[in-house]
């Protein structure tokens, strides 16, 4: 009885023309969800993490060991030290990375806040305010995203040199450059999020007596927090990990170079400092992690829930 | 509190030739509950939004009290609006939602709290004041939206289909609550709905709109008894009025074999454009079942019987095919509706003889669609 009903079902399936596809999909799904699939996933994950793990282990090994053997020899000859970190964070001026660490922070924080605050306001103008040519300008702004930033490096550098922006405020060229490159995407993303906010909500606020400033500060900003937080994380990571813009617009001035530039220099002109490089790289990972975990609580789903029905 | 006046108010949407609201003239008295009703796209919501200041007025004026508010920002009009989807601020608690307008106006905190609590008491929301909107049911959200309007004690309440998102039972309940609340507060109210039952039950007066044009304004009774034109006749009342266009001969309207006598005044007011025809309207509840021999009785073939307990409605066609074509009703082309005794409903396929009750037939000119004097 059971066997016959199964064949019947299969025949019906085939008759409907979906038999082969469905069984193939089912097989694939089965293969991916079974234990072998899980095992493969774990292997890939381990392989992916090995270099980072090696870097971490190297950063904890004594200088002589690093120069003499690979990190995997650690398992046969374990020897750990925090000397590398000590040197990187507080050693002599030639090996001390804390200056660059501070530089990176000084560069990254304003380079995140500046485009973010501009983009939120621009997004409000593009999504809530109604003015002639709004869509045209918006498309124009986003079109700028197509231009690779490398194209803008030289003109922008000349502009900063001509206007002597760096002498007004040491970090100004870096802040401006990062902001400029971030704005199109930021405006685009935030605009899309803002367009999701129901118009009725804004109209209700306007009838309640709110002007645009109040609507922006009291209604839009709280509702935009998830979008703002995600963009803040992206932009901060981008600036923190950036080497090209940092190197170009610091103009070779070591006093304002970011951590990435210092790390790059270590592999380049001081190739012997592997122990510092590994420790420095790990120090530079800490801040992005802190930023991510402190902002992730703003990732709330369904912030608009309960506002409008339907 | 104040009256509201639309003075030839017109709104033409950009890119559109025909106005969404065409020279609307309407006066709402102080403390009155006026319902704007019409099919979708008739301009009723646009009219309300013009009054709210959310929509530009292309020509004409709008006055609240004696003040011309045509070009005044919404925030300076001293009005409160309840939206169809409530539009609550999702990140604020119920109390903050209700007190938002007062907070912006710079009212002292203690006074805000007091007024919010008063409104919450009226609306039975006291225990929900600290909740967020998402933790409320649909009916509670609707009441918060009402509360947000009440707290401000504005000159005018504007309501844009505030009940359309509630389920049928809650809608009927809230309907009476809103109506009695409005009577108690005595605030001038303009209420938009597409539901003519809501309009009839809630409004002091009803204004029917169609294609941006005002069709008729009047009390629910006036709208029901003396609809000014064919559109209003078909729109007000549930189930809708049966309307049919028939030939006139010998002072009578001819429904195939049946002849319905017309009065002198009606006949006199027919013009040449009417082409010797007349549009007759009769409500399902104005028909009596009778027997074949009765004067003015006509046969109806039963297609379907809808039994509601208190009433039974027969959906059918005139037995004569040609005359049947001429009739329309809420049930569609060539269909007509008859209310019958729910205790003795006819069966499907039966033929019932019905007769229009004396004085309950409506006459309209086929050419202009307007009501004829009778």
Image (cartoon, coloured by chain):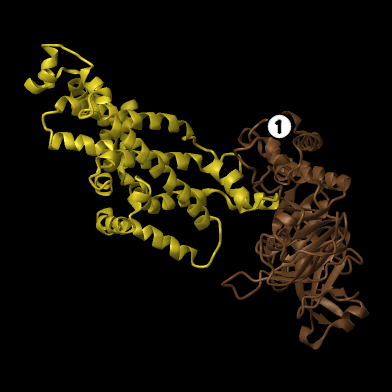
Q: Which chain is yellow?
A: A
In depth, the one of A130 and B230 nearer the eye is: A130
User: On the image, which quarter does residue A260 sit in?
Assistant: top left
Give the side of residue A130 with respect to residue A30, left or right. right
- Residue B185 in percent (x, y) is at 86, 46
- Residue B128 in percent (x, y) is at 70, 31
The residue positioned farthest toward the front in the image shown: A167
Give the residue at mark 1: B129
Q: Chain of mark 1?
A: B
| Residue at image location 57% in from the left, 50% down from the top | A198
Identify the element where label 1 is drawn. Answer: loop
In depth, the one of B176 and B233 nearer the eye is: B176
- Residue B271 in percent (x, y) is at 82, 86
The residue positioned farthest toward the bottom in the image shown: B272
Q: Which chain is brown?
A: B
Is A51 drawn above or below residue B340 in the view shown? Answer: above
Is A92 drawn above or below residue B274 in the view shown? Answer: above
């Amino acid at each position: 009885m059971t066997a016959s009903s199964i064949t019947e079902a299969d025949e019906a399936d085939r008759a409907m023309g979906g038999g082969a596809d469905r069984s193939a999909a089912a097989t694939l799904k089965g293969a991916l969800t079974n234990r072998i699939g899980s095992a493969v996933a774990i292997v890939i994950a381990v392989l992916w993490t090995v270099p980072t793990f090696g870097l971490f282990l190297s950063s904890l090994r004594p200088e002589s060991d690093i120069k003499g053997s690979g990190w995997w020899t650690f398992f046969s000859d374990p020897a750990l030290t925090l000397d590398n970190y000590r040197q990187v964070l507080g050693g002599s001026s030639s090996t001390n990375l804390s200056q660059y660490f501070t530089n990176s922070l000084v560069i990254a924080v304003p380079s995140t806040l500046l485009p973010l605050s501009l983009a939120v306001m621009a997004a409000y103008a593009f999504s809530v305010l109604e003015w002639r040519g709004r869509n045209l300008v918006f498309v124009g702004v986003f079109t700028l995203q197509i231009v690779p930033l490398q194209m803008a490096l030289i003109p922008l550098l000349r502009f900063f040199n001509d206007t002597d922006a760096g002498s007004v405020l040491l970090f100004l060229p870096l802040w401006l450059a990062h902001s400029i490159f971030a704005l199109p995407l930021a405006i685009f993303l935030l605009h899309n999020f803002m367009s999701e906010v129901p118009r009725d909500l804004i109209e209700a606020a306007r009838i309640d007596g709110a002007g645009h400033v109040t609507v922006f500060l009291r209604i839009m900003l709280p509702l935009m927090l998830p979008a703002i937080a995600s963009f803040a994380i992206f932009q901060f990571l981008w600036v923190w990990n950036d080497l090209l813009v940092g190197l170009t617009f610091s103009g070779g001035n070591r006093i304002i170079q970011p951590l990435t530039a210092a790390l790059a220099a270590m592999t380049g002109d001081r190739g012997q400092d592997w122990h510092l490089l590994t420790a420095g790289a790990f120090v530079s990972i800490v801040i992005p992690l802190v930023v991510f975990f402190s902002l992730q609580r703003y990732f709330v789903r369904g912030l608009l829930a309960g506002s409008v029905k339907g | 509190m104040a009256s509201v006046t639309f003075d030839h108010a017109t709104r033409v949407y950009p890119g559109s030739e025909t106005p969404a609201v065409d020279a609307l003239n309407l006066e709402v008295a102080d403390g009155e509950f006026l319902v704007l009703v019409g099919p979708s796209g008739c301009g009723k919501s646009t009219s309300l939004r013009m009054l709210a200041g959310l929509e530009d007025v292309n020509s004409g004026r709008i006055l609240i009290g004696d003040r011309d508010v045509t070009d005044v920002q919404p925030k300076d009009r001293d009005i409160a609006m309840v939206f169809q989807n409530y539009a609550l601020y999702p990140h604020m608690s119920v109390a903050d939602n209700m007190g938002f307008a007062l907070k912006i106006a710079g009212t002292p905190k203690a006074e805000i709290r007091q007024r919010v609590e008063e409104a919450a008491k009226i609306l039975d929301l006291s225990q929900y004041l600290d909740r967020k909107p998402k933790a409320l049911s649909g009916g509670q959200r609707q009441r918060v939206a009402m509360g947000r309007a009440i707290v401000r004690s504005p000159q005018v309440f504007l309501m844009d289909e505030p009940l359309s998102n509630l389920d049928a039972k809650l809608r009927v309940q809230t309907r009476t609550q809103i109506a009695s609340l409005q009577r108690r507060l005595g605030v001038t109210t303009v209420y938009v709905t597409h539901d003519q039952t809501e309009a009839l039950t809630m409004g002091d007066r009803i204004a029917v709109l169609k294609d941006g044009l005002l069709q008729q304004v009047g009390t629910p009774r006036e709208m029901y008894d003396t609809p000014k034109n064919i559109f209003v006749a078909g729109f007000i009342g549930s189930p809708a009025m049966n309307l049919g266009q028939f030939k006139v001969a010998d002072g009578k309207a001819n429904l195939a074999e049946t002849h319905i006598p017309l009065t002198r005044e009606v006949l006199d007011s027919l013009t040449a454009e009417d082409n010797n025809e007349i549009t007759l309207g009769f409500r399902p509840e104005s028909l009596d079942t009778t027997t074949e021999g009765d004067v003015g009785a006509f046969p109806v073939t039963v297609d379907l019987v809808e039994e509601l307990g208190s009433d039974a409605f027969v959906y059918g066609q005139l037995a004569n095919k040609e005359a049947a074509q001429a009739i329309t009703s809420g049930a569609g082309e060539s269909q007509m509706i008859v209310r019958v005794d729910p205790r003795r409903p006819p069966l499907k396929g039966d033929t019932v003889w019905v007769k229009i009750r004396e004085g309950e037939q409506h006459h309209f000119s086929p050419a202009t669609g307007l009501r004829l004097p009778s």
